[in-house]
Structure formats: structure tokens, C-alpha cells
Image (cartoon, helix red, strand yellow):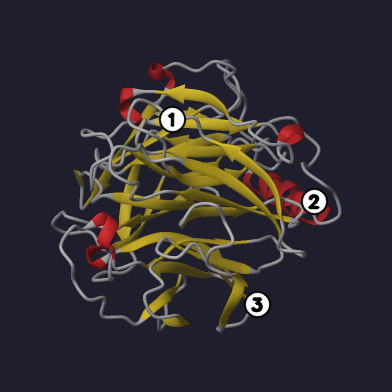
Amino acid sequence: MQSLVFGVSRAPRLAVSAPAVRWRRAACALAVLGSAFGCGSDDDDADTVALADSGSLTALTTAMEIPTTVAVRDGVAWVSESQFDHYQPFNMVTVEAPGPFRLVGVPLAGGAPQTIALPANYFPEGVTVSLANRMYVGSVATGAIYTVDPGGLEAREFLPAGTLDKPSVLGMAVSTDVKVLWACNTVTSPPAGELPSADLVGIDTSTRQIVATHQLPASTVGSFCNDVVVAPNGNLWVTESFGGRLFRIPAAEALTNSAATLWLQAPQLAGPNGPAAGAFGVNGLTLLGGRLFVVNSSQGALFNIDPGLAAPVPDDLQRVAVQEGGAEVLLSNPDGITAQGESGILVVENGLGLPGGKRLVRVDLQ
């Protein structure tokens, strides 16, 4: 198996040892709690480790109710059960939502699942955990956001429905200083004749006021903000699913408005049918080992790219061959992803409209 040394430029960089990576990450986590953005380096992820160009898949759960995103808190992977097969904008057949709506907690070291109850017809989509261990979960149906205290199992309202300009909240991430919650705010079902539109919105975690709005300019098929990740230095990376695009917002411009810059548009990131149900292209994203990893829902594929490239081109995307049981497989409508440890990526397969899936899996890149 060929190995790649993931860095932040086209030139190779030496991998650092695992203990050094852990020390630097711990030091950064402590440092950023007292600073605005960033941690000692201009790189989007200064730590580089040797990761493989293929991954071995292990299923951690099965038979979930259309899971979408995942975030890890205290060794437990929390997954949104969104039940999108019952959600009207994504399924034009009216079906009563059965409930209950919840987050499912999967202990990564093994053990019985946990649950966090959510309001009726909440249709959770994005879920994220801050460096202070506070969890946030947003509703694609109402635009509300709920929060869960560190170590707690009870969700309470953080942002009421109707506060944001657009009706749906999808992917979210918290700034490295834990002062700003970033949320994809999207029109999932626009009026006839209008294109979908989307913003990345920054919400002050203390005052709950909107402090920044970054519009994602429409492509020929509109705009759909799906997920966001914050780099250690405070840079923001955003996926736009209908146009197959990645946007970047520099840390220095995060608290301004409309600073999102198109960083890459590529066929590998696009969906096959534009803004049609089930036609999402690029979806979840995460940073690991100095690389930016993204999934394409329609292609069932995992890609990575160097986030330090100033002007990337489609050929800079590297596809990760995923194997399960010794055979290469496609992911079943991959959705949210997050890094775990130094060589693992947790992937939610929502399986929406496809056989299989509806599970949380781990892809080991070793």
C-alpha cells in the first residue's frame, strides 16, 4: 500500500511522530480557549502524519433512521437521526413523521448506545461539539438550534426557529475560541422559479446574536451550504453541494460579511442532476493529518486535498479507495464526517434512496 505524507503544499513534508502530534494538539486546544482565532501556525492543520491512499472500513452501527452527521464527545460518537424519508422538501410524498427525534450516542470503545431526545418533527441535521465539550444540533425543518451541556443528556433551546434568515440549519462548527457557532443556513425548498440560496452564519455563543453572514454565491443551479469545518488557525472551509464547490473564509475575515471565496469547483465534487432530491454532490468535510477530506454523496466517494494550495485544480483531489471485507466498495450516500484519532475518519452513510447504508462507519487510513 502506497503511503502519502500529507502536508500543506505541493512539496512533500516529513511526518511527525504520533506523540508529537498529540502534544501539539493538546497544547493548541488549551491555547485557543484564551485567544481569538488560531494556534501558532498559518497552516490550516500544521500537524502532518503519514496516511495511506486507501482505507479499511469498519461498521460501528446499523439500521439507523436516516443518519446524517456525527460529532464526538468524551469517546461517544453522537449521530443525528434525521428521518429524511419523511421530510417534505426532500421527499415529495407526504408521509407522517413517526418520531421520536433524537441523537444516538455510539460509544467508540464499545457499550450500549445512549440517546438525547429532541422535539417532535425536529428533523436534526448538523451536530457539532465545541472544544469546551458543548454540543449543538440544528434542525433542517425549522432552523432552530438546540444545545446540550458538557456531559449532559438533555437538549435545550439555543436559537429559536425563525431567528435566522433562511429556514434550514445544516452543518455546524464552533470557532477555536468557542465564541462563535458557525451554521450553514439554507433554503432547501425554494419557491417555483427561484434557485436555492445559502449563507454561512456566525452566531455568538454567549449573546446568541448573529455576528457575521457569508453568502455563498449561486452557481447555475443555485447554492446549498451543507457543512463547515474550522481549521486550527481559524480558517473556515465550507461545502456547497449543488454546484460541487468548496469555499474558504480566512480567519482574519471570519467576522466580516460575505468573505467566502470560491476555492475549488470540480466534477468530482458535483452531483449528477443539479438541485434535485438526492442529487447532492460534495457534503461532509473534516481535517486530518494536514489534509482536507470531503465526501461526495452521489458518487459514494471520499476525497482529500491539500488545504494549503492557493489555487487548486480538480486534479489536486485525491480519491481514497475504501475497502470493506477485502473488496473495494462505494459508500452508501455518505453525509457527515469527522476525524477520529490520528488516522481515522468517522463517516455517516445515510443511505437515502439507496440500498444499505443507514449506519456509522470508521475508515482507517493506515
Instruction: Name the one closer to the observer, 54 or 169.
Output: 169
In the rendered image, which quarter is residue 287 located in? top right
Residue 34 placement (x, y as % from top left): 86, 55
Q: Nearer the viewer, mark 3 or mark 1?
A: 1
Q: Residue at x 47, y 67 (%)?
A: 77
For the N terminus, which image quadrant? Answer: top left
Instruction: Name the one closer to the observer, 153 or 40.
Output: 153
Q: Residues within 10 Å of mark 1 (few under 14, many from 20)?
A: some
The answer to whether residue 340 of the structure is visible from this angle is no
Instruction: Identify whether 134 is placed above or below 128.
Output: below
Instruction: Identify whether 331 is placed above or below 59.
Output: above
Give the distance between the C-alpha atoms of the residues marked 2 and 3, in whole angstroms.
20 Å
Q: Are marks 2 and 1 in contact (CB under 8 Å)?
A: no
Q: Nearer the viewer, mark 2 or mark 3?
A: 3
Residue 308 placement (x, y as % from top left): 61, 24
Instruction: Identify whether 11 is placed above or below 211.
Output: above
The answer to whether residue 359 of the structure is visible from this angle is yes
| Secondary structure at numbered mark 1 | loop
**Amino acid type shown at disc 3:** Asp
Dot 1 corresponds to which residue? 218
Dot 3 corresponds to which residue? 149
Q: Residues within 10 Å of mark 3 (few under 14, many from 20)?
A: some
Residue 89 placement (x, y as % from top left): 28, 56
Give the side of residue 20 with respect to residue 302, left or right: right
